[in-house]
Structure formats: structure tokens, C-alpha cells
Image (cartoon, grey):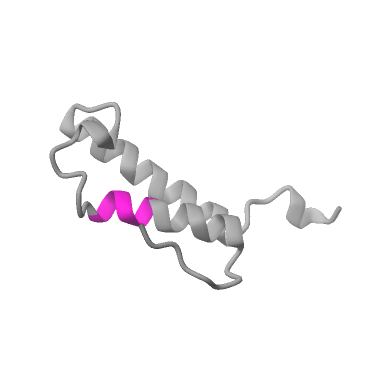
Amino acid sequence: MGSDAQAPDKWVAARDEAKAKLLACQKEHGVESCMKCEKVIGCEVRNDYVKKVYESMNKGQGGGFEF
């Protein structure tokens, strides 16, 4: 394996950044889960995190994830 195997790719880096924002938001709202937050429906922070997780799994190969 090359050196790329050790460094996170851009999709993983974006996912990790979105996760950090999500965790900060949960802390700010005093919840341990988005499901316990009154703003869960339509929450941009959560939706961005879900999108970034999907993108990190498909590595930019297209498709979409609608829920």
C-alpha cells in the first residue's frame, strides 16, 4: 500500500470535520443524540454530517442518499 493508505482522504477529512461540528452542536444543545434535539427535523448540521458520511463511503463515485 502507498502513502495514501496512512493519510485520510478528502472525503474522510470532510466527514471528520462534519462530525466535529455535529458533536459541538449536540454539546451546545445539551443532548447526547440528535434524536433528542427538538431541531432534528431539517437540521442543516445533521444533514451535512449524513451527507459527508455517505460521500466518505462512496468516495465521490456519484449517486445520492435521500431520506
Q: Is residue 45 above or below residue 35?
A: below
The x and y percentages for residue 67 are: 35, 57
In the image: residue 1, left or right of residue 26: right
Outermost residue to the bottom:
62
Q: Total marks drawn?
A: 0
In the image: residue 30, left or right of residue 9: left
State the image quarter where residue 57 is shown: bottom right
The x and y percentages for residue 24 are: 29, 38
The residue positioned 20% from the left and 54% from the top of the image is 42
47 within the magenta span:
yes
The residue positioned 33% from the left and 45% from the top of the image is 21
The foreground one among 64 and 1 is 64
Outermost residue to the front:
67
Q: Is residue 20 above or below residue 32?
A: below
The residue positioned 60% from the left and 61% from the top of the image is 58
Q: Is residue 54 above or below residue 16?
A: below
Magenta range is 44-49
State the image quarter where residue 2 is shown: bottom right
Outermost residue to the right:
1
The residue positioned 55% from the left and 56% from the top of the image is 56
In the image: residue 33, left or right of residue 38: right
In the image: residue 4, left or right of residue 21: right
The x and y percentages for residue 49 are: 38, 51
11 within the magenta span:
no
Question: Dominant secondary structure of the magenta stretch?
Answer: helix
